[in-house]
Image (spheres, helix red, strand yellow):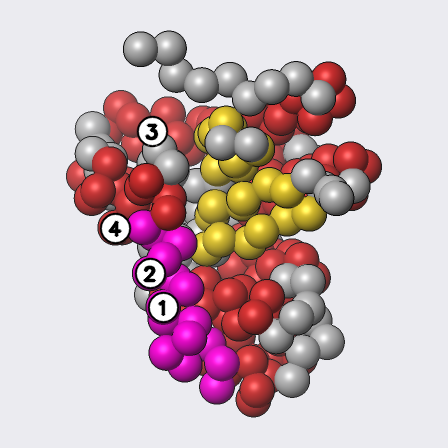
Amino acid sequence: MPRTIDYYFSLMSPWAYIGHAPFMEIARRHGIEVNYKPVFLGRVFAETGGLPLAQRHPARQRYRLVELQRWREKRGLSFNIKPQYWPFEVNLADRFVIAAAVSGKDPDTLLRRAFSALWEREQDLGNPAVLAEIAEAAGFDSSSLMDLANSSTTEAIYALNLENAVAGDIFGSPAYVLGGEVFWGQDRLELLDDALTSGRPAYIPVV
C-alpha cells in the first residue's frame, strides 16, 4: 500500500504555487499518494495565532517580497510578485480543487493551470468564468465541476480540512504531512524528500 501525504494549501498562497511542481515530482518519484486538502488561510491564521499579510509588521512584509524574488529565481519561475488580482475571494477556487478530487480525478493539472493563471498570467481566480475556463483547459467538465464546487458536500469537506489542519498543527500554506510529521513551507521540500528516501519514523514534538 503506497504511503500518503496530506497536502494542505490554498490557491491564495504564492508559496503553494512555488512549491507545487517540485512537490508533485517528489511524490511521483517516491510513489506517494497525495491527499489534496485546500484550506481557508484566513481561518487557519485566526485559529493558530497567525496574522493576515496586511496586519504584519512592515519589515515582515518587505522581507516576504525579497523571499519571493529569491525563490522565483531558485525555482526557475517567471511571475509577478504582486499580481493584479491578488488577494481575491478564494473559497470557490479552493473548492474547485476539492470538487476535482471528489469527482475521482487528480487535481494536479487543474492546480497547475490555476496557479499559473493567477501568478503568471494575472487572471482573476475569484471570477467563476475564469475558473470554468481553467477547468475546461485541464480536461474537466466545467459545468459539473462548478455544481460540485458549490455543493454542500464540498462545503463540508472544506470545513473538515480546516478542522483537521488546526488539529494537526498546520498554521500556513503549503504544509505537507507525512505520517503525522508536518513539513511547513515549500522550502522544506528537501527535508520531506530526505524523509521519504530514508523511510525513517516520523519526528514528533519533544515535550
Q: Residue at x 45, y 63 (%)?
A: 94
- Name the amino acid type tagged 4: Arg
Residue drawn at (59%, 66%) of the image: 101
What x and y, as percent, mark residue 15?
50, 39
* Residue assigned mark 1: 156
Q: Secondary structure at mark 1?
A: helix
Horizontal arrangement in the rendering, residue 28 relative to residue 202 (left or right): right
* Residue 163 against residue 90 in the figure, above or below: above
Are the two marked residues, 1 and 2, in contact with CB atoms closer than 8 angstroms? yes
Real-space CA distance between mark 4 and mark 1, rounded to the nearest whole angstrom? 15 Å
Front-most of 181 and 194? 181
The mark closer to the camera, 3 or 4, is: 4
- Residue 43 tag number: 4
Quarter of the figure with the N terminus:
top right
Marks 3 and 4 in Cβ contact (< 8 Å) = no
Q: Quadrant of the C terminus?
A: top left
Counting from the top left corner in percent of width and height, residue 57 is at 20, 28
Residue at label 2? 159
125, 2: nearer the viewer: 2
The magenta segment is 147-163
Residue 158 forms part of the magenta stretch: yes
> Which percent across, then down, holds residue 154?
43, 72
